[in-house]
Amino acid sequence: GDGLVAAYRAGADITDLDLAIFNAFVARYDIGPGMSMYVGLGGKFINSEDERFMEGYDPELKDRAPLYRLTPAFAMEVRRGKGPIFLDMTHFTGEQVRQLKRVIPLPMMMYEKVGLVKGDRFVEKIEWMPYAPVQRGGLLTNDKYETCLSGLYACGDATPIAGDIGGASYLPGAVTSGIKAGRHAAERAKGIGMVEVEEKQIRELRGKTLMLMDRTEGVEPDHIVVALQEAVMPYDVLLLREEGRMKKALAEIEDIRDNLLPLLCAYDHHYLRMALEVKNIVACAEMQLRSSIFRKESRGGTCLREDYPYRDNVDWLKWVLVRT
């Protein structure tokens, strides 16, 4: 969030922080990707009682449901006391497992290394979990990828993931938006000429940045990261959203901002990088929570509100802006 927060502090409009991208992964091991292929070959999501539950949430697609249906369903099953969730591939034939080894060899090697695959068989069910919603917001731009700050352009992941703002999602969007933004930025730069550097401002910013290294004791960045995760990572904060729970999480973020961030210290330049980064992470978390609380509806696969369960195109077919 470094670039996003820098643009926000400079006065750029940020949008789409209230919407999110969902995902799900293996719970106990850092193994991925491949889930689309697993369910495509017949992998089954089951709860702790060995029940296939996705038909109740998506009767048509079931285990092949999109991620924005799967991840809330996992959370709801856990809330019902039927967690953890597993992906069962123990019934796969030897040919299916060999096909996986040909198409996604790295994950399959990792499954073998931890003993989940032996020979050409999955020998255990694999615990699965929803991944925390990833904010998809960015700088609001016009069709030239210029922000509301004259001369500031954004492309790729610096713009909202939603294709109908800028189409800058993922690698193809990064390439096309980068070409367009770069062309317009270069054209603008031609007519500007040399710019005087404000040495006084640089000295002030340098002093403010390095002052964290002057402290001999204080709060380490990792401590704040853990506190932040404990506030926003629970599934009933940003996955299954409800105003009271989000406001409670927001109060915890405000407490971190007001009482922990001022105590940040950095022992060396590595810690300094981490300290500066964690300040921006806290700012992003606050912006995301405030935006999520503000949107009073559920919208497709990007925002699920338990207290506002329906889409509202009358009042909420619009972007939520964050600005200084």
Image (cartoon, rainbow, N blue to C red):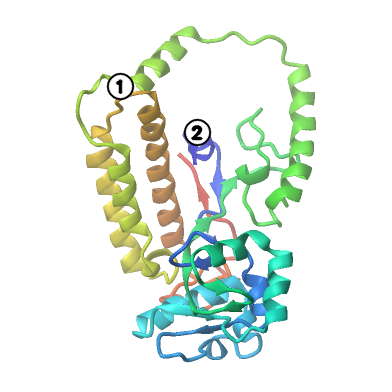
Pick whichever, 67 or 248, lies toward us: 67
Residue at x-position 35% and y-position 20%: 210
Q: Is residue 235 above or below residue 161?
A: below
> Looking at the picture, which amino acid does disc 1 mark?
Met
Residue topped by disc 1: 213
Q: Is residue 311 visible?
A: no
Residue topped by disc 2: 6
Helix, strand or loop for disc 1? helix
Helix, strand or loop for disc 2? helix
Q: Is residue 90 visible?
A: yes
Pick whichever, 273 or 97, lies toward us: 97
- Name which quarter of the figure residue 183 lies in: top right
Q: Position of residue 132 (x, y in %)?
A: 46, 62
Q: Nearer the viewer, mark 2 or mark 1?
A: 1
Which part of the image, by quadrant, shows the C terminus?
top left
Q: Is residue 146 left or right of residue 291?
A: right
* Crowding at mark 1 (Cα within 10 Å: few <14, some 14-19, many 20+): some
| Numbered badge on residue 317 | none
Residue at x-position 38% and y-position 70%: 242
- Name which quarter of the figure residue 206 lies in: top left
